[in-house]
Every structure is written in structure tokens, then in C-alpha cells.
Image (spheres, grey):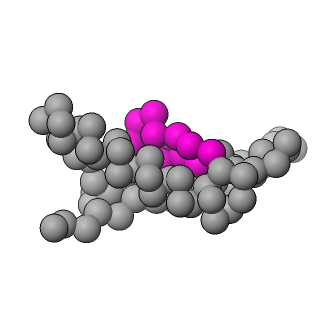
Amino acid sequence: MKVLNYKILLKKEPEGGFTVFVPSLLGCITYGDTLDEAIEKAKEAIELYIESLKAHDEEIPTEENILEYTLSIDTNA
């Protein structure tokens, strides 16, 4: 069994809870009322996403060649 790692982005929502995005898996988005629930739901969403890719004989994206960088933009310019 191959272990795959995916970065997730968690956005705290104004009404409460967290929306979770998986950038490497287009459209893989979920939500949880707490941080722990959001992370658990992200794991489930990723597993289901990969299961669907396998069922359709599609390539499973990995993050092996992904670089991450954070840009800071001055909005007072």
C-alpha cells in the first residue's frame, strides 16, 4: 500500500466551523463544525475522491513535484 500525503487548507467561516480545500484534488472540498471534525472529514473526502479515480481508471494526483510559496502583497500601494 502506497501512502500519499495531501496538503489541506482550512478556512474559518464567519458563521462557525471550517471549510476544507484540497488544492491538489480539484473540487475536493468539505466542511466541519470543529477543527478536528473538519480534518477528519477531509480525510474521508480524500479517500472517497481517490476511490472514485481508481474506479474510473484515472490517474491519482500526487504532490511530489509541488512547490509551495506564500506571497505577501502590500495593499497600501
Residue 4 in percent (x, y) is at 29, 63
Q: How many marks?
A: 0
Residue 50 among magenta residues = no
Decide if residue 58 is in sight here.
Answer: no
- The range drawn in magenta is 20-31
Decide if residue 60 is in sight here.
Answer: yes
Q: Which part of the image, by quadrant, shows the N terminus?
A: bottom left
Q: Residue at horizontal 62%, vertical 59%?
A: 37
Q: Nearer the viewer, residue 53 or 10?
A: 53
Residue 13 in percent (x, y) is at 78, 45
Residue 72: quarter of image: bottom right
Residue 26 among magenta residues = yes
Q: Nearer the viewer, residue 69 or 51?
A: 51
Q: Residue at horizontal 25%, vertical 68%?
A: 3
Q: Nearer the viewer, residue 58 or 68?
A: 58
**Side (left or right) of 59 relative to 36:** left
- In the displayed structure, 70 sits above or below 26; it is below
